[in-house]
Image (spheres, rainbow, N blue to C red):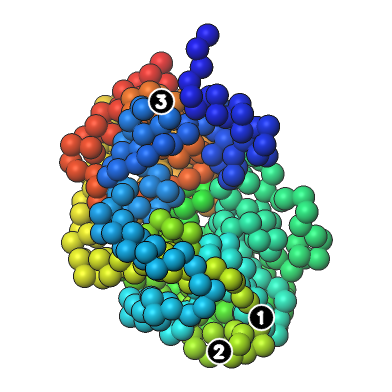
Amino acid sequence: MNISTSQALFEKAQHFIPGGVNSPVRAFRAVGGSPIFIKSAKGPYVYDEDDNEYIELINSWGPMILGHGNELIQKAVSDAIQHSFSFGAPTRREVEMAELITTMVPSIEKVRMVNSGTEATMSAIRVARGFTGRDKIIKFEGCYHGHGDSFLIAAGSGAVTFGTPDSPGVTKGVANDTLTAPYNDLAAVQKLVDANKGHIAALILEPVVGNMGCVLPAEGFLEGLRKICDEEGIVFIFDEVMTGFRLSKGGAQERFGIKPDLTTLGKIIGGGMPVGAYGGKAEIMNWVSPLGPVYQAGTLSGNPIAMAAGLTMLNYLNEHPEVYTKLELSGHKLVNGFTNSMKKLGLNYTINSIGSMYTLFFTDQAVTDFPSAKSSNLPLFGKYFHAMLDRGIYMGPSQFESMFLSTALENSHIDRIIEANEESLKEVIG
């Protein structure tokens, strides 16, 4: 039997890379089969090593908001490369990037560049602990903030897919300092706060969750958390690695009208290059070294190539509000199409969406938290994933992921996705 180039690469990769992949969800363990190895991408399409073309709904897990291979960003990267790849020294673009971020996100008065979302969240927690002199943090079941030890307690996304939300290698001491609450449950948060008076440094959450699928905050939830944090002197942290600059120019915090004390960023601010950032109130950020005593450093932080890509991306988003109008229209069209198809087929699955993020959950329950997300029929999702793939639609290979739309998707692409979805649902429900 002939095997595809992707299958052959995956077999080879497993000899040299743990699980054959460099990030767990890529292994297709949640949906079965072998992962597709991508060779190139342009606009709304990705192409695998066997030259198959797919309309793409991952967009590198969010940053390709303008689609793949955007010409403006390509030129910015090409121009920057002419001056070398990295300096380990300050550059003009770092200053311009910091100024632009503070202009677009009003809650951020000062910002520090890092190299990934995980670095950003780890650093934000550290500075919150230094600023408050406290040890404990509160996070939420199903929210994922990278693979830092403090966050791998009831984590979401890849950890959930494998059924191991508590990772070996995380010490009991770290686990004891991490308090976990159900998402959208203010009473549970208040109970944790009351039981740990004066010990909680920070509360961190995804204001719109993307790592147990797309889950929105209930009305009053974010406002209630802001109130609790104000009353208890807790640093309120929004993890906007996924939602920052995607849900609006100022991220989820602009969309919901809530100002956190600190914000973590990634994905879009690199235009697809590896990058992250954390920032917020000056009085907190002034605790970061070399100005303050909380140490954090990075040789490649503010990498000039990443800064060139990110600056071009953010400047474009800042100057073209029509981007968000198009994303909203695409999101509405897709969700309405999916909903109409389910009505036609007599199905009652749940779709959560906001702007250019959405998840189709294979459950008839409203999905508002981690337990309701886990009520989804995972084997059925796996069949659906492959049915969509067979029809040229490349989605995230896990029920517990949000999909991300880009401005490269035209109405004709959305129509194809809706048609593929209806055909795939027909196939998997028999």
Q: Against 362, is 206 above or below?
A: below
* Residue 300 figure quarter: bottom right
Residue 159 is at least partly visible in this image: yes
Q: Residue at x 59, y 39 (%)?
A: 21
User: Where does label 3 land, which residue?
Assistant: 50
The label on residue 178 is none
Residue position for label 2: 286
Could you tell me the amino acid type at mark 3?
Answer: Asp
Q: Which residue is mark 1?
A: 295
Kindly identify the amino acid type of the residue bearing the numbered disc 1: Tyr
At numbered mark 1, what does the secondary structure look like: helix, strand or loop? loop
Q: Is residue 363 left or right of residue 345?
A: right
How many residues crowd mark 3 within 10 Å: few (<14), some (14–19), many (20+)?
A: few
Name the mark nearer the viewer: 2 or 1: 1
* Whole-percent x, y for residue 180 in the image: 66, 61
Comparing 29 with 346, the one in front is: 29
In the rendered structure, the answer to whether residue 55 lies left or right of residue 205 reads left
Q: Quadrant of the C terminus?
A: top left
Distance, label 2 to label 1, CA atoms, is 11 Å
Horizontal side, residue 38 vs residue 74: left or right: right
**Residue 342 locus on image (x, y percent):** 31, 31
